[in-house]
Amino acid sequence: MSRIVGHLDLDYFYAQVEEVEAPSLKDSPIVVCVFSGRTEESGVVSTANYKAREYGIRSGIPIALAKRRLNGIEAAFIPMDRGKYETYSERIMETLRGQVDVLEQAGIDEAFFDITKRTGGDYEAGAALAFELKARIFREEKLTCSIGIGPNKVVAKIASDLKKPDGLTVVKDEEAPRFLSPLPIDKIYGVGPKTAKLLEESGLKTIGALARAPTERLEDLLGKRVAVYLHDASNSTDDEPVVDRGGFSQLSRIITLKQDSHDLDQIVGALAPAVKDLHERLVSETLFFRSVSVLGILKDLSTHTKSKTFETPTNDFPVLEKEVRELFSGLLREVGDLRRAGVRVSDFKDMRNQHSLAEFTG
Ligand code: DCP
Ligand code: CA
Ligand code: CA
């Protein structure tokens, strides 16, 4: 029986959430901004709705440039509110998890899913289920998304991007090679600009060309691991499973102290094995985090937290250790004796795909 794997990606996610929260904005350009605070205009665009994209507004361009491009047009420049988008994301992922065999969240606004069992491997049933998922998210959240269905993750991911926004693309097992063949190689997830350049320079421009290339040639260029992945991906024989990594939004550990304490060394020392365990979990899941919080629960069971957010994601143990200590030091200045102590990391980035290819291409 052929697998049926899907990939779902929410359309212009942060900007669409802003539309939902302020429907009067819907017909004008919306630019979600990460203001750096130095001047009123410094910072970058996080994302924009499709109306704004008509004016050339894209993720990553300077806010100042976006303002120039929208000069004289009534547009909304809204500061990014990550916590808000995470709340939507968590709700949607929980809904989806209940409707598929396995759900693997792959980012704040996207997930792979396996529906082989519940469809019996039938693509008509798979398409109907995907349609129902889209309808349900729209009904419950007023958000549109795009879904791709195929025999593996590589095909599903490419397919979900094909008819954005509000698209549904179904690529049956037997159609997959012909579907992939004419596409440029950088459509394969994990193939960044460096790998793409390397392959193009040796004449491999399309996924079809990659599929026909002798594996030894790919191995010489990129090493064995990447060569095997690219060979499978381009031949539509990628067999990477869809794996539920549990809730994606946060990981935490909490301990009860032997006795209530206000001593920094004692608290951090008691929590150390839990922090180590948490870090091992991060490494095994190839997750990098941007936010770390500590929490203390007092005798009266009130909970107090302190958090820090980094500019770039990290999974460095010394950084985590040091931050936990500093946050507790701050927390203890504000509260009395702790009964329980905990640490939480969140705001994840999954580094797995970047990782496997970057390693070989430098
Ligand atoms: N994001 C960001 N900075 C980037 C890229 C993305 O802050 N350089 C954020 C904002 C996006 C969200 O991540 O809304 C999801 O990213 P996508 O790449 O899925 O882009 P969108 O959902 O915005 O648009 P699309 O409709 O193309 O999926
Ligand atoms: Ca998206
Ligand atoms: Ca996405």
Image (cartoon, grey):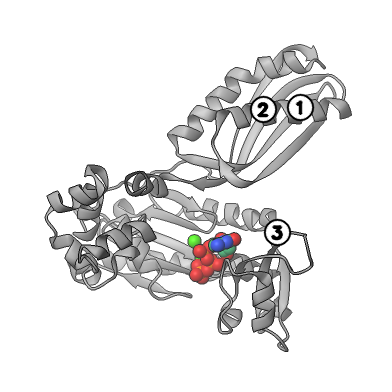
Whole-number angstrom distance, CA of label 1 to CA of label 3:
26 Å
Residue beneath the point at 57% across and 69% down = 143
**Picture quarter containing residue 270?**
top right
Q: CA distance from mark 1 to mark 2?
A: 10 Å
The residue beneath circle 3 is 81
Whether the residue under disc 3 has CB within 8 Å of ligand 1 = no
Q: Is 196 above or below relative to 296? A: below
**Whole-percent x, y for residue 235 in the image:** 18, 59
Query: In front: 125, or 54?
Result: 54
Nearer to us in this view, 293 or 194? 194
- Where's residue 100, x and y in %? 41, 53
Q: Are marks 1 and 2 in contact (CB under 8 Å)?
A: no
Observer-nearest residue: 37 or 350?
Answer: 37
- Which of pointers 2 and 3 indicates the residue nearer the eye? 2
The mark nearer the N terminus, 2 or 3, is 3
Q: Amino acid at mark 2?
A: Lys
At horizontal 59% and vertical 69% (from top left) the residue drawn is: 61
Amino acid type of disc 3?
Asp
Can you tell which mark lies on residue 328? 1
In the shown orientation, is residue 166 left or right of residue 334? Answer: left
Which structural element holds mark 1? helix
Name the amino acid type tagged 1: Phe
Give me the disc on residue 322: 2
